[in-house]
């Protein structure tokens, strides 16, 4: 499953179906009947035939017998219940609702039909009606756990997660063996960002029901987000062992292997995902990130078919057009690639409006805050060096992080927004606790690595906004500012399908504006803190790696080691958009790539050329 939290219908409501109520040895006579002889069958024979076909997965045949049962005017609560489940599974929601009402009139004391009706109303987004049914059930039977569980699902739909959590806890109090309640609790805590609590609830759910491939997949996602890739891999493999055709498990496993640099395995598993679900756009996008020039061309025909577009929503179309663009780019068909990029980003902007203004406003505000805060006395006894890599996305920061983390004493945090969280907490508490320092709060977050490492590398790129605060408040802090040719940087950002937080990336104009603001902000900070900020020019780094890396290592006052020149050998996990490229030796292939998209970049060139620094950028 992807990092989108959702609980499928299968996981939310463990629907009740009735088993075949007789010994299989007794059905020989029944099998001699054909569908032409339906009228000759007795009530029990119709029921038995329907149950057999249903249990064998022969849905159309089962439906024929269920419907004939109704047409004959027979009544049996087992048949009605199973037929409701079948209709819901076939997305015949209105028919299922009608059958629920019919069943309730005939069997008013059977609560199962009422709970089924409530879940169907949720599917139709008729939440008031669903809530009314559950309230009525609770009034007459307050110990029925399923009513509380369904109410929690209503609150989840309403995004009232606190009430949903309360009702899930009530569900568990009444039935502590009901695994979906633990699963949904885990989903809520995952949404809150409390991954360890989410992990606990997923594990509890699996202790009760170890055969849920969805829960194994969800647990794998938690392990992945916690950086525990071995357990994540194990969880995804468990999901596959339960359901060998579960595409999302293959997808997530492929993503893990991409992060770990096992590119061949990553490609093999994403191709399997496509094999089992050829209409999932995210699978194609991941494959084009891993290897858009794969020799397996079957998937390309599917990706470029009109059929796949007809079966997708707006979010999925974004993945399709980014994937198509990647293929065209690999084939050097840059005009076609540009057309797909434009479509993908236009859809993205409609779905997620640009956050350019928000970013620029925040940068300017934090500069004001950094200027009014007094510079703290540095702690000479600090034993941990804190390196912050800042700049724009797609500026060479992942390569730099791989180079620096070749140092056995260095620990890279990846793109973890630890500093901002510490700063917001500091602002909240500092007025009441004058002895509190930002350095103390930040150090508390990274002290778990203190026994093994004395160098901590933080690559949350938007920390450029906090440069003044970092260098005035954090002990032993240094900033490395990554930058590259602005046009290469802008097109690289525009070509990336970011998961979240970078919605300005869907507009060439807005990327240019954010780039200029970032450059302006860093220029101002460099005037004040020049000795503590290193300029890392990506273009020079990949053109003259030995010279540039030696210069950087010297500035850091580290002992030189030739391993810094071979970062592709670094076994660390890399989850950024550069996860595949960083596994190759340092090269300058990406320099000047903007020229392939120069027509698309004209708005950016116009914006940049109005500044003194970039006035000659026009080709």
Image: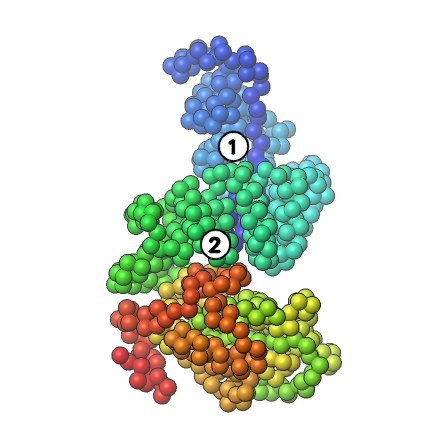
Asked whether 467 or 595 is in front, the reply is 595
Asked whether 183 or 166 is in front, the reply is 183
Q: Residue at left 44%, top 54%?
A: 263
Q: Residue at left 54%, top 37%?
A: 242
345 shown above or below 132: below
Residue located beneath label 1 in the image? 85
Position of residue 483 in the picture relative to residue 197 (left or right): left
Q: Earlier in the sequence, mark 1 or mark 2?
A: 1
| Residue 619 % position (x, y) | 26, 79
Q: Residue at left 37%, top 86%?
A: 613
Q: Residue at left 58%, top 31%?
A: 16
Helix, strand or loop for disc 1: helix
Q: Is residue 544 visible?
A: yes
How many C-alpha atoms fall within 10 Å of the one at disc 1: few (<14), some, or many (≥20)?
A: some
Q: Which mark is residue 598?
A: none
Q: Toward which corner of the image does residue 439 lie, by quadrant?
A: bottom right
Q: CA distance from mark 1 to mark 2?
A: 43 Å
Residue located beneath label 2 in the image? 262
Q: Is residue 316 visible?
A: no
Between circles 1 and 2, the one closer to the viewer is 2
| Residue 445 % position (x, y) | 66, 69
| Residue 553 % position (x, y) | 53, 78
Position of residue 452 in the picture relative to residue 40 (left or right): right
12 shown above or below 3: above
């Amino acid at each position: 499953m992807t990092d989108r939290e959702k609980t499928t219908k299968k996981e939310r409501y463990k629907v009740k179906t009735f088993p075949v109520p007789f010994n299989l040895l007794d059905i020989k006579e029944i099998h001699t009947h054909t569908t032409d002889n339906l009228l000759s069958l007795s009530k029990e024979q119709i029921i038995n035939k329907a149950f057999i076909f249903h249990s064998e997965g022969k849905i159309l045949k089962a439906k024929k017998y269920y419907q004939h049962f109704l047409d004959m005017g027979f009544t049996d609560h087992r048949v009605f219940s199973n037929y409701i489940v079948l209709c819901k599974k076939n997305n015949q929601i209105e028919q299922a609702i009608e059958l629920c009402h019919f069943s309730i009139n005939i069997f008013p004391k059977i609560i199962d039909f009422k709970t089924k009706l409530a879940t169907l109303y949720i599917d139709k987004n008729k939440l008031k009606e669903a809530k009314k049914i559950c309230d009525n059930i609770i009034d007459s039977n307050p110990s029925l756990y399923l009513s509380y569980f369904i109410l929690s699902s209503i609150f989840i739909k309403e995004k009232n997660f606190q009430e949903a959590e309360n009702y899930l806890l009530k569900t568990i109090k009444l039935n502590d063996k009901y695994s979906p309640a633990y699963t949904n609790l885990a989903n809520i805590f995952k949404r809150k960002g409390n991954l360890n609590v989410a992990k606990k609830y997923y594990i509890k759910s699996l202790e009760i029901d170890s055969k849920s491939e969805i829960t194994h997949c969800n647990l794998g996602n938690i392990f992945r987000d916690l950086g525990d890739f071995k357990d994540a891999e194990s969880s995804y493999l468990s999901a596959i062992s339960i359901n060998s055709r579960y595409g999302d498990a293959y997808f997530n496993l492929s993503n893990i292997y991409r992060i770990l640099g096992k590119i061949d395995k990553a490609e093999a598993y994403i191709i399997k995902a496509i094999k089992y679900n050829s209409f999932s756009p995210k699978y194609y996008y991941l494959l084009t990130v891993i290897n858009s020039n794969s020799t397996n061309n079957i998937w390309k025909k599917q990706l470029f078919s009109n059929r796949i577009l007809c079966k997708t929503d707006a979010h999925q179309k974004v993945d399709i057009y980014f994937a198509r663009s990647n293929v065209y780019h690999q084939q050097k068909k840059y005009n076609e690639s540009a057309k797909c990029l434009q479509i993908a980003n236009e859809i993205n902007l409609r779905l997620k409006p640009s956050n350019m203004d928000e970013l620029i406003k925040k940068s300017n505000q934090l500069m004001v805050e950094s200027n009014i805060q007094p510079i703290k006395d540095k702690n000479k006894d600090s034993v941990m060096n804190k390196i912050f890599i800042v700049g724009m996305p797609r500026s060479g920061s992942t390569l730099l992080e791989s180079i620096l983390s070749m140092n056995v004493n260095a620990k890279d945090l990846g793109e973890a927004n630890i500093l901002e969280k510490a700063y917001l907490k500091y602002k909240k508490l500092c007025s009441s606790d004058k002895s509190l320092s930002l350095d103390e709060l930040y150090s508390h977050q990274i002290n778990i690595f203190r026994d093994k490492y004395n160098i901590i590398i933080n690559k949350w790129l938007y920390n450029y906004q906090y440069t003044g605060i970092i260098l005035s408040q954090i002990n032993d802090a240094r900033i490395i500012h990554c930058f590259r040719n602005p046009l290469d940087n802008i097109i690289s950002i525009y070509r990336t399908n970011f998961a979240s937080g970078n919605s300005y990336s869907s507009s060439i104009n807005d990327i240019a504006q954010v780039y200029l603001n970032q450059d302006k902000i860093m220029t101002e900070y460099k005037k004040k803190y020049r000795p503590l900020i290193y300029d890392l020019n990506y273009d020079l780094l990949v053109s003259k790696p030995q010279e540039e890396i030696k210069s950087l290592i010297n500035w850091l006052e580290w002992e030189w080691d030739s391993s810094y020149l071979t970062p592709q050998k670094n076994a660390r996990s890399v989850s950024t958009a550069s996860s595949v490229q960083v596994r190759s030796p340092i090269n300058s292939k990406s320099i000047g790539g903007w020229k392939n998209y120069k027509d698309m970049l004209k708005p950016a060139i116009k914006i940049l050329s109005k500044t003194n620094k970039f006035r000659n950028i026009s080709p």
